[in-house]
Amino acid sequence: MVRDLEATTLRKVRSRLIPFLALLYFAAFIDRVNVSFAALQMNRDLDFSAYVYGLGAGLFFVTYCIFEVPSNLVLHKVGGRLWIARIMLTWAVIAGAMAFITGSTGFYVLRLLLGAAEAGFFPGVVYYLTYWVPAAQRAQLVAGFMTAIPISTAIGAPISSAILSLDGALGLAGWQWLFLSETVPSLILGVATLLYLRDTPDQVEWLSADEKKWLTGTLEAERAYRRGKYEHSVLGALTNPRVLALSLCYFGVEIGLYGVILWVPQIFTNVGIPAALVGYVVAIPYAVAAVGMVWWCRRSDRRKERVWHIAIASIVGFCGLAASAYLPNSPTLSVIAITFGAVGTLAILPIFWTLPAAILNGAAAAGAIALINALGNIGGFAGPYVIGWIKNATGSFTYGLLAVASGVLLTGIMALIIGHDAAAEQGGSLAPVRAPSAVGS
């Protein structure tokens, strides 16, 4: 039966690719945000103000944005396996070098280099999955990959706190141990990527001939529909008004995501949670967010609806982050509010990436997905920078949290304005995609 073939094929793809890709993203995200925990000691040891830390944390996204499109176009040419491995190995080396900074200049330079090294990883994986997962099932599977964000924070937070307790061991500060130890998994996984991943379904042995035929046939039907309706050159895709609108949509959610995730340890210590416990408390909102992300994306896939799911999640995220701005004296209520903010913000991300994938193909898709991620990730710079700047000026997180909450709400509004071509998820028809006739029914 066609449905049995579809279910079996997607189950194999999910089990073979998603856990491994999520593990890569887990390592990437820890290397990207462990600076938020290192700051609990590093800011003291190196005499960094809130402004210096906020600027350095955000500078990562400047070079990350600049090199996103070139990186993804190279991936399109050389294949995901080789390029994703290259990204992982270079970011691992630079992340480890963070242990040896001695002042703000070194901090700024290495954060810029880390952004350049990691550029293209996330959009590269999103683009890579367009060769493996039909659009109708993509939100759920991308959610499985993107659970690495909250899980890496939920697991990495207590681990980071434990590593910080090594402060003074062998003459190294706890924050130096943090950067050095959390680099090792990325080095190992970079080598594993070369050995494990394959670029396209026809290169693997774990799919049968019928499964390969169904999968490639379904994906080609989707590409044919998009070619007929949304044919773009690379330059045309990069300047397309809808692509630019999607970039603004993504900008809003990235403000909320990184504005909070790079400051949350300090936000929680500010409301009275002891520094020794903060890593364990940070795990709470992001563990809940991992469950919420997967559930909300499965619901979106079942209902074949995208924009209202993004809009509702944005309202939840906005309300949680805005509420957290007015709870400076209540640790419990602050954690609850940040939890709602994290759930809403993170639930947006996998569903959002179904929107550009529905209108783009080939090199145009590689370039445009990277551009959306690049321009959107300016929010990754703006979020932590704005919170640091406002905190330095006012001594409070209140107005900074309101600013990043507004960014999340902007995403929901923009999604409703942009809309979504649901027919593109079924090769131009809302009826289920049939397998090639040779497979049978």
Image (cartoon, rainbow, N blue to C red):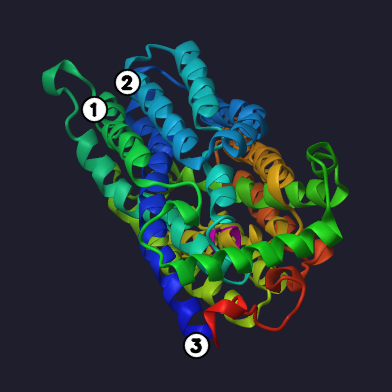
- 315 sits left or right of 38 in the view: right
Q: Residues within 10 Å of mark 1 (few under 14, many from 20)?
A: many
Residue at 41% across, 64% down: 207
In front of the other: 226 or 118 = 226
Q: Which residues are magenta?
A: 344-349
Q: Is residue 207 above or below residue 388?
A: below
Q: Is residue 168 above or below residue 393?
A: above
Disc 1 to disc 2: CB gap under 8 Å: yes
Q: Which amino acid lies under the numbered mark 1 shown in the image of this protein?
A: Trp
In the picture of the structure, the residue carrying the numbered disc 3 is 1
Residue 41's spot in the image, x, y percent?
32, 28
Residue at 69% across, 67% down: 221
Prevalent SS, magenta region: helix
Residue 264's spot in the image, x, y percent?
45, 46
Residue 224's spot in the image, x, y percent?
75, 62
Residue 244 on the magenta segment = no
| Location of the C terminus (image quadrant) | bottom right
Residue 150's spot in the image, x, y percent?
42, 55
In front of the other: 305 or 21 = 21
**Disc on res. 177:** 1
In the picture of the structure, the residue carrying the numbered disc 2 is 99
- 66 sits left or right of 143 in the view: right
Q: Is residue 171 above or below residue 214?
A: above
Q: Secondary structure at mark 2?
A: helix
Q: Choose mark 2 or mark 3, whichever is in front.
A: 3
Disc 2 to disc 3: CB gap under 8 Å: no
Residue at 34% across, 46% down: 196
Query: Who comes first in sequence, dot 2 or dot 3?
Result: 3
Q: Is residue 1 above or below residue 123?
A: below
- Mark pair 2, 3: CA separation: 56 Å
Q: Which amino acid lies under the numbered mark 2 shown in the image of this protein?
A: Ala
Residue 346 on the magenta segment = yes
